[in-house]
Image (spheres, rainbow, N blue to C red):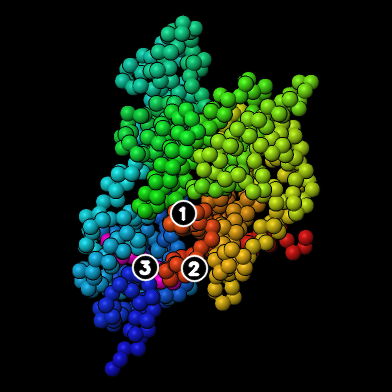
Amino acid sequence: MKNTIAYRIYDFLKQFPPFQFMAKRDLLEICELAQVQYLDKDQILFKRDAPYNTHFYIVHQGAIKLSRPSHQGIKTVDICDEGDLLGLRVTKEDSYRTTAIANEETIIYALPMEAFATLTKENKAVSNYLITSFASNIKDPYTLENSGQLLSEYDPERSQNIYGVSKARFTEKVIQSSQDISIQEAASKMKKYQISCLVISENNIPIGILTNRDLRNVIASGEFTATTLVKEVMVTPVICASPDINVTQTQLILLTHGISHLVITKDGTPQTTIVGILSKHDIVVSFANSPIGLLKEIKRATRTKHLRQAWSKTMLLLKRYLDQNLPLSQILKIFGELKDALIHQTMQLSLRKMETTPPVTFAWLALGSQGRKEQLLYTDQDNALIYANSDTENPEQVKQYFLKLANRMNKRLHKIGYDYCPADMMASNPLYCLSLSEWEAQFSTWITTPTPENILLSGIFFDYTFMYGDQTLVKGLTDHISEKLAHQKVVLRHMAKHALKNLPPISFFRQFIVESNGEHKDFFDIKHRAIAPLSDAARVLALGQGILHTKNTSERFTALAAIDAPNRELFENCSYAFRALLKFRTKRGMAQNDSGRFINLEALTKAEKLKLKRCFKPLRDVQEVLRVRYQTQNI
């Protein structure tokens, strides 16, 4: 007699990889042994560190959240929905690496692991697909070549070391001192413990650092004596990092700041307690085509064409990282450092071409996606320039100097590969090359007069970040904006309404909403229909909570989750969804050799479409939070 349930399971599974690679007879045999399970919301399917069950699982309806501990608490690493596979053992580890909990009422199919492994042992397409893409006990597994077995010798740590993304090992025993001892006492202490640096602290909070090199420079200069107090010569502020920093990030920070030691603190800032110390001697130097090699090449560039050549290599590095499924958060950090170096060197070359030095201090700002450090592919430029207020009798002459400098910068960035902004939102535009007081007045206007045009502009300019020059100018502007927002909450309501202009990109019948006309007719606009609405929501909610220094969308949602307990789970889901969407767009852009904005849905697999749809649910929910919190229907 025909097993109706088994055939229903078969009809469902055959739509998804890796089951679509299996012969009908083999898949039906597995389906005969399958179990149907129902889970209530928040019901646990399996726990981290628990032994593997005899079955693995496929979500039929609903969603399963995968989480694991981190130094910031419990972190959501994935959300599995229709067609997603989880709980399958693909390495020789004996226990789960994540905890799986039903995110809503969920129906799953449980398939016997041993029978599945037997039937797919000789099916290379199935085993390779599982190892590289669907191992729920490994976050972001890496591609394995020539792997023909389901249970492989795959070693995540070894794979990470190849690309310099393994966790950096730091020394937990940190020799500390107060700032009120003498240089001679500090040197004696360093000699006693055979260390190359001394961390200066108060109540285990880092306030300065003193290295062998610093001591040599102090002695050589002849400006200080052995009785000089350490607080007079220590290096401050202290450059810090969090305990989960990897090798590549460490190398980039050490090279970028020209330092030899990195203090590890609880949350990576100088405001929390010391947990370790990292030196450049602790880091294994990567191969030549690593981020470190590219950073050095960028810093050595003497012509714009050299910068263009170096930056084209970063695109090859990006492709490799995407192919290896490196977590997007790590990719963004690595490329953020490289982009900072690119802007810095581009500005240095531009300044060398100016006839005179700058008449006053200035700062170069990145706006939009670059300001949020979310720009990976070549896109158009969005930037601005802020310069110090001047007492000169000819302020127009000062402005013309910086307009000329900005024009040189924009031209160089264009030669490197970044198109001019179609809306002319660039520092070479007199509207966006202003003194500090002029910028303060401009932001005051945007905040106090929330017209549609002003709201549109503020949505771009609120996401600025410092890239070069005098950072105190940027801090002054940020403080001014903070003060204005504290007394003008109405602008947030208008920004919230603007953030709701793009509804979730799924129709009532769960179909993608695509472009109805124009050059990209029937294509899906992932930027305007999915990524931008999440960025807009994060901006409004973060500004409403006084979070001004965090600009990255994913990090904004993470910061919101830490202070808004009722919506913690939603904001964590939004953070994950944003990273997933941005990574998807970047991959499509690399494949299509464009920005990845418009996607031909017919080129996607069913699994890819489902994963996209999965990211839209938190967008719908966070927009409802905006609607309720800011009562946008009353504007």
On the image, the x and y values in percent for residue 560 come to 58, 51
Mark closer to the observer (1, 2)? 1
Mark 3 / mark 1, whichever is N-terminal: 3
Q: Amino acid at mark 1?
A: Asn
On the image, the x and y values in percent for residue 528 come to 60, 59
For mark 1, give the secondary structure: loop
Identify the residue at image location x=35%, y=77%.
14
Q: CA distance from mark 1 to mark 2?
A: 17 Å
Q: Amino acid at mark 2?
A: Leu
Magenta stretch containing residue 225, yes or no? no
Q: Residues within 10 Å of mark 3 (few under 14, many from 20)?
A: many
Mark 1 / mark 2, whichever is N-terminal: 1
The part of the image, by quadrant, that contains residue 34 is bottom left
Q: CA distance from mark 3 to mark 1?
A: 31 Å
Residue at which label 2 appears: 601
Residue at which label 1 appears: 593
- State if disc 2 and disc 1 touch (CB < 8 Å): no
For mark 3, give the secondary structure: strand
Magenta stretch containing residue 83, yes or no? yes
Identify the residue at image location x=32%, y=69%.
18
Q: Where are the magenta residues, as a range?
A: 82-90
Seen in the image, is 441 located left or right of residue 25? Answer: right
Identify the residue at image location x=28%, y=80%.
24
Residue at which label 3 appears: 85
